[in-house]
Amino acid sequence: MATNTSQIPDLSSVFSSSWFGKLKFIIVLLVILYLFKSTLIFIPPGYVGVTYDRGRGVLEGVKKEGMSFAIPMWQTVYYFDTKIQEYTMSAAVDEGALRKDDSLDAPTSDGQQVKVDATVLFRLDPEKAPELLRSIGVEFVDKIIRPFSRSQIRMVISRYTAPQIYSEKRQEAETIMTQELSELLKSKYIVIDKVLLRAVYFSPEYSKAIEQKVIAEQRVKQAEFEVKEATQRAQSKIAEAKGLAEAQALQKATLTQEFLELEAIKKWDGKLPQVSGGGSNPFINIPLK
């Protein structure tokens, strides 16, 4: 029996016209979506974007927060955080930027070795972000912030004695660190807001000596206060006694015989005494004529 080949469908034509066509459409759609997604750039709040173009290098100007565009596979956008950031160097492993003892060892002017926990608050100049990418790169924290901060903090601490850093000169040292580090990093397009000395650690022996000194100073101040208070009480009593003596002297000087008789007359009820003894008049002499 002869087979009618005209009634058998061509599988290749069916595949090409149906499944293969749909597959091509899906692939093209996915490529378009990928290119569209790669073209759209979203800059988060507080960030700027810097574009690196494979043909022209780092482009001038920055992309502000919001939606922007870039050429897929030809341009790369680097994000820079322009908000205030902190870099902490601490002895506590869970507080610093590095999860280890990252405190600074620094000598003081009186030969003591101290350990310091410090925090540097900084921000980037948004308009200078392209130059920052070009000259330093995105690793500016490790390349600039960390080494410059540690060096400058050590340098400033070396100008003070250990007791000064421990107490009255600490705020002054922070101010100087901030000013000098700001000058150093100005040319690197980094703005320093504040350098904070979070903690200062001394050797156990020196810490005990400082504690004993503080206790001794407090005792001296307490003794001085007590002496001053006792002196004031004594002066007050002297002044009170002097005033009383002067009042008594004045009163005595004004007590004449006439004054006493006048006061007695004011208090007399008009009755003469019924009994009298001795040879003297118990009352006063009142002239009858």
Image: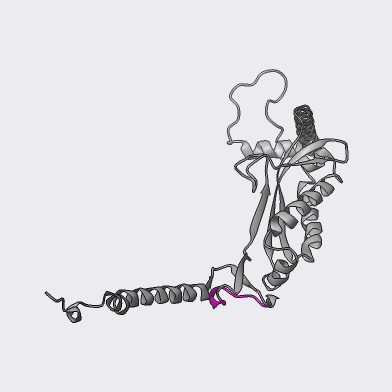
* Percent coordinates x, y for residue 141 in the rendering: 69, 56
The outermost residue toward the front is 1
Residue 113 higher or lower than 191, as above or below: above
Q: Looking at this view, is 112 or 188 the one in front?
A: 188
* Percent coordinates x, y for residue 224 in the rendering: 80, 32
Residue 49 higher or lower than 260, as above or below: below
| Residue at 85% in and 44% down | 158
Residue 9 higher or lower than 236, as above or below: below
Q: Which residues are magenta?
A: 60-71
* Percent coordinates x, y for residue 183 in the rendering: 81, 62
Left or right: residue 155 compared with residue 218: right
**Rendered image coloring scheme:** one colour
Q: Looking at this view, is 56 or 202 the one in front?
A: 56
Residue 255: which quarter of the image?
A: top right
Query: In which quadrant will I find the N terminus?
Result: bottom left
Query: Can residue 138 be seen in this snapshot?
Result: yes
Q: Looking at this view, is 246 or 259 the one in front?
A: 246
Q: Looking at this view, is 266 or 237 the one in front?
A: 237
The outermost residue toward the top is 278
Query: Can residue 60 be seen in this snapshot?
Result: no
* Percent coordinates x, y for residue 33 in the rendering: 44, 74
| Residue at 40% in and 76% down | 29
Residue 264: which quarter of the image?
A: top right
Query: In which quadrant will I find the C terminus?
Result: top right
Q: Is the stretch drawn in magenta largely helix, strand or loop?
A: loop
Residue 43: which quarter of the image?
A: bottom right
Left or right: residue 69 compared with residue 4: right
The total number of labels drawn is 0
The outermost residue toward the left is 1
62 drawn magenta: yes
98 drawn magenta: no
